[in-house]
Image: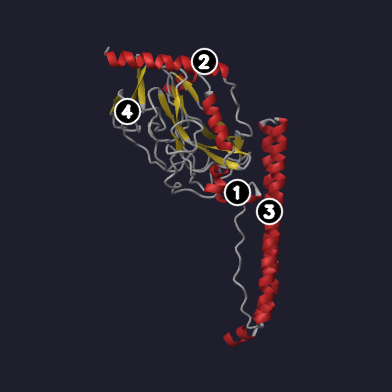
Amino acid sequence: MTQSVKAMRIVLSIRWLLFAAMMLTTPVKSPANIVLSVVIAPPPLPVYEQPFCPGEGYIWTPGYWAYGDYGFFWVPGTWVLVPEPGLLWTPGYWGWSDGFFIFHEGYWGPHAGFYGGIFYGFGYDGFGYEGGYWNRGVFFYNRSVNNVRNVTNVYNKTVVNNITVNNVSYNGGAGGVSARPTAAQETAVRERHIPPSSAQREHVQEASTNRKLYESANHGKPPIAATARPAEFRGHSVVAAKAAARTYMPATTRTVARPGSSNTASRPVAPLHPNDIPPTARPSFSNTGNAKLDKKYQRNQEKLQASQEQQRRKLQQKQEQDHQRLAQMRANDSRRQQLEQKHQQQTRQLEQKHTREQQSLQSRQQPATRNSPAAKERR
């Protein structure tokens, strides 16, 4: 063993001791208001680059979509200090089962286990981990898939990708990845596991409070796609997404899982919350040839638009208060799911009401439009 490797092991050992001491003295925060089962498919993974590794002993944990008070939000990929030498990270993933998309939390273990066959990139090809390996307590980084510098324990191994990368973020159901655990992954399930560290949980918590990371705000292209360290969402080490996935569709048109069905076909899904309702298409103002009448129709249209926007804001505020009450009650996932279904029904009813109002306004204008001087001249 070379002197540099020996010195590296000593440095890592000191880091592990400091990290362990910090874990004993730091309260572990459980991410609040995180829903683990939903009825709508998560968005596809965005396209982004990996920030530089901050130093020895850090392993990459890929970003993913979680679900919180305001819908899906992006948890940025980040480099995490390993809880102890010899461990690898198995990413969490969404899987469809019995009418719901259920989130399976990631964990640390001696081997990378099953993570839904999701192609997260950066060494996570859906079937294991090709980003590096442990040798005598030292982690060696594969430079072909990791963005590392100022790190001496590196190597290059080309990772052959035999699957089509479509950025799908869930397993099973319509449009989901159809992978199943391999024999090695099933063995890894029975090994000793360590849950996400306090730093990782803080990372998720911080992401859940950043409205810019919610799909409703970033439309599948989060402004903070990856970070060099957990919960560091500012500074030069923050990486924005290059683009949303080519297959991205808004929540209103994505697959919905329905209890009692095989979910073998894509179905449009009702918006979950008022903020998810797409803006009402404003029809072009009538040209009746009567300036006074045209102005009246324009005022009616603007008045209806303002009224509908006020109703959307009012319902959104009410639903947010519902979420806050559940959070204070520390409600379980079942209660949260019931509330989401109730909110979805309320939102759908509001959307239908607005559509009827728009159609009614247009029908009232049509007779006058047909009899207008301009229309008669065209005939």
Residue identifier under label 3: 312
N-terminal label among 1 and 3: 1
Q: Does residue 59 appear to the left or right of 252 in the view shown? A: left
Q: Secondary structure at mark 4?
A: loop
Name of the residue lying farthest toward the left? 2
N-terminal label among 1 and 2: 2
**Looking at the picture, which amino acid does disc 3 mark?**
Arg
The quarter of the picture where residue 331 lies is top right
Residue identifier under label 2: 21
Check if mark 1's residue and mark 3's residue have beta carbons within 8 Å.
Answer: no
N-terminal label among 1 and 4: 4
At 29% from the left and 29% from the top, the residue drawn is 157
**Looking at the picture, which amino acid does disc 4 mark?**
Asn
Residue identifier under label 1: 269
Q: CA distance from mark 3 to mark 2?
A: 49 Å
Check if mark 4's residue and mark 2's residue have beta carbons within 8 Å.
Answer: no
Check if mark 1's residue and mark 2's residue have beta carbons within 8 Å.
Answer: no
Name of the residue lying farthest toward the bottom? 377
Residue 337 drawn at (x, y percent): 67, 37
Quadrant (top left/top right/bottom left/bottom right) for the N terminus: top left
Quadrant (top left/top right/bottom left/bottom right) for the C terminus: bottom right
Q: Nearer the viewer, mark 3 or mark 2?
A: 2
Q: Secondary structure at mark 3?
A: helix
